[in-house]
Image (cartoon, rainbow, N blue to C red):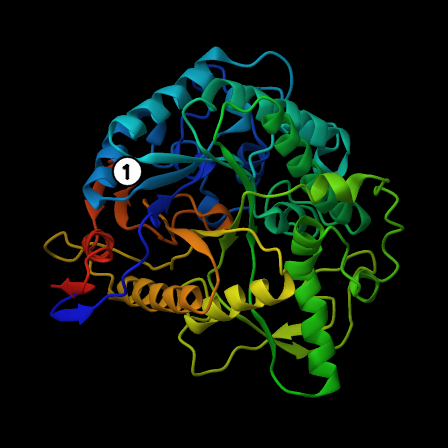
Amino acid sequence: MTGESTFPTFPDGFRWGVATSAYQIEGAVDVNGRGASIWDTFSHRAGAVDNGDTGDVACDHYHRYGEDIALMRELGVDSYRFSVAWPRIQPQGSGTPSSAGLDFYSRLVDELLAAGIEPCLTLYHWDLPQRLEEAGGWCERDTAGRFADYAAIVHRELGDRVRLWTTLNEPFCAAFLGYAEGRHAPGAREGHEALAAAHHLLLGHGAATAAMRAQRYGDESFGITLNLNPVTPVSDSPEDVAAARRYECYQNLAFSDPVLAGSYPDVESTVWGEISDFSFRRGGDLELIGTELDFLGVNNYFPAYVRAAPFESVDPKLRTADDIGIELDPPESLRRTTMNWPVEAAGLSRLLLWLGERYPELPPIYITENGTSGFDAPDGEGEIHDGHRIEYLDTHLRELRGAMRAGVVVHGYYCWSLLDNFEWAEGYKQRFGLVYVDFESQRRVRKDSFDWYRRAVAHSREPDGSLTG
């Protein structure tokens, strides 16, 4: 960003951060006894990931975390949101933990604290141990119990130094992209079983939170991260309004209502039809799932504009975004990212205000992911000019501040992502990082957005909010 513009100031104590996840950056998939995860298996399946890419090496963060922490320190961020790889702690998904795995994350936490950066730890960012998947994965209720055991192990090791704990990242993706649409690991296309996976993920969240609270060290905070979209019908027609309600249930309410309201969405029978008898639900489940949160993590990248479409499911047991009678149809005026996601910063403030209206007892929020993709590449001088990312971050942060002034309580913002990384089924072609990674040499190159974010963080606390070039 060049020249001079004003930048909104944020309250004292507002946390600025960057975010990553284990499988996307760590690599070292067969080091020190780490077991296989569902993403190790899925990414090696022919045709599952663009260009046949895998996370085997990724950003080699496992060996280069010191260099990456130095980048964070240069950014001036307060906090780093990362995830722990479950198969690095319990290679088979249960049993005695790996001392080498625990030691790695202990060293990471210690070095973060030495750099003045607060760890924000996510226990599950989609890398289920493959052995548990072979026993049924999240479709089986037992996996929720195994997750609580794993959470207690990690918390017992790190709870004396880590204050911010997130159980799950985006259970929507883990359940529906993984078990219904088949676009993510484990690559299943199911109906009843996908809904069971969604339920058991939330049950695991509740059980893990209870297990950690039972052994808490002191002032830890526990939460969950949901990926949510503001949903708008493209017209006032009854058909489009009904379609928007179905999509809102699929994308948001199937997860936010049990967690934040202790109830199942009243529209769910319209969305899921006859594909499930919900026999996986038991008495007391909602009470556990709806355990009080210290904070809610919100991931948001784009808005959803919904148009009604015919119900023409190729398989009546599936109920995905493609076959619940909806079509996503954003206005043509909205710019698209390289992921083909519409860009509308005002969607973030609409979402936050909607959350506050729907859930009167809403806990404090952290924006745990927000950012944009690009086909970023060095120019002839080796520099990466990503003005599109600067514009995206600038406009979304302004909308965030506006929502806060309107009364939504937000305690922090984590930019996705620190590094270009393995972008799941998209492989390495989509780059979200403030830092460019040459995946062959592992060389890190700061993008223009890195410097912009560094200055934004520094100046956001200055009285005049001035951001100069």
Position of residue 284 in the picture relative to residue 343 (left or right) = right
Q: Which residue shows up at 46% across the image and 71% down it?
A: 342
* Residue 134 can be seen, yes or no: no
Residue 361, position in %: x, y?
62, 55
The image quadrant that residue 329 belongs to is: bottom right
The image quadrant that residue 115 belongs to is: top left
Which residue is denoted by mark 1 in the rendering? 440
Residue 433, position in %: x, y?
32, 50
Residue 461, position in %: x, y?
23, 55
* Crowding at mark 1 (Cα within 10 Å: few <14, some 14-19, many 20+): few
Position of residue 426 in the picture relative to residue 372 (left or right) = right
Image height check: is 255 above or below 105?
Answer: below
> 431 or 165, which is in the foreground?
165
Position of residue 359 in the picture relative to residue 342 (left or right) = right
Please state, as top left, top right, bottom left or bottom right, where the N terminus lies in the image. Answer: bottom left
Secondary structure beneath disc 1?
Answer: loop
Image height check: is 208 above or below 328?
Answer: above
Amino acid type of the residue tagged 1 in the rendering: Glu
* Residue 289 can be seen, yes or no: yes
Residue 336, position in %: x, y?
42, 71
Image height check: is 205 above or below 297?
Answer: above
* Total numbered labels placed on residues in the image: 1
Position of residue 445 in the picture relative to residue 270 (left or right) = left
